[in-house]
Image (tube, rainbow, N blue to C red):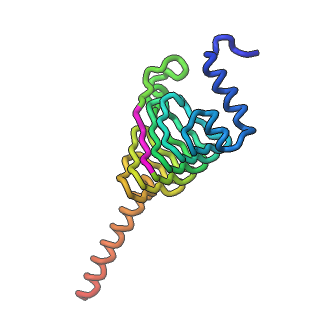
Amino acid sequence: MFDQNTDPSLRNQILKYHVSQVMTDRERAELLGLPEGCRIRENAKIISPENLKCGKNVWIGEGAVLDASGGLEIGDNTQIGLYTLIWSHSSIKQALSGQTGTTNKGIVRKPTKIGRNCFIGGQSTVYPGVVIGDSSVVLPMSLVSKDIPERSISSGEMGDRLKDLENKVKSLEGRLELLERRD
């Protein structure tokens, strides 16, 4: 029934997550080796936990996926919302070259870093290699594909595009108003 070639450490990780479903958030965090004061909700997953550098008092929401395969650092007192995806690898090249399931070639790994005292709103996605500065806020349902400076509020890529469009509309309205005054 079980594949005898499965790496025992993978089987151990699967069992650990299964057992963790009946624990409190703090018990689950301790079982998964997270530092003092951390809490992790049900169904959250850490990929390659050996590559995760996690600060104290971090809260990880239900269903979040933290991919540390390329290196992931999370600073003290940071909150990661429900069903948030934080990536440190991409397998796009592997898929496009037809190598899915046959080799690890084509998988690109980049360290991802989230600073201290950050809030990452639920159902957001953070791309590999992104750095989010200390005391920054990522609004819910954001797609973060580029670095965010410290003490910033970001709505991700789509929010940036909307801001650009709003600025263009305001500029065009200003020009139109000047033209109307001339008439």
Q: Is residue 108 left or right of residue 15?
A: left
- Residue found 46% across the figure and 56% down from its top: 137
User: Horizontal and vertical percent for residue 67?
Assistant: 52, 35
The span shown in magenta is 110-116
Q: Nearer the viewer, residue 115 or 105?
A: 115
Q: Is residue 45 magenta?
A: no
For the C terminus, the image quarter is: bottom left
Taking 3 as reference, is 123 above or below it? below
For the N terminus, the image quarter is: top right
- Residue found 54% across the figure and 43% down from its top: 85
User: Horizontal and vertical percent for residue 165?
Assistant: 38, 64
Q: Is residue 16 left or right of residue 177?
A: right
Taking 2 as reference, is 71 above or below it? below
Q: Nearer the viewer, residue 172 or 74?
A: 74
Q: Nearer the viewer, residue 21 or 2?
A: 21
- Residue found 68% across the figure and 11% down from its top: 4
User: Horizontal and vertical percent for residue 142?
Assistant: 49, 53
Taking 32 as reference, is 97 above or below it? above
Q: Is residue 46 left or right of residue 143?
A: right
Q: Is residue 66 left or right of residue 109?
A: right
User: Horizontal and vertical percent for residue 18?
Assistant: 71, 31
- Residue found 67% across the figure and 29% down from its top: 16
Question: Please, which residue is most extreme toward the top here?
Answer: 4
Question: Please, which residue is most extreme toward the left here?
Answer: 182
Taking 58 as reference, is 106 above or below it? above
Q: How many marks?
A: 0
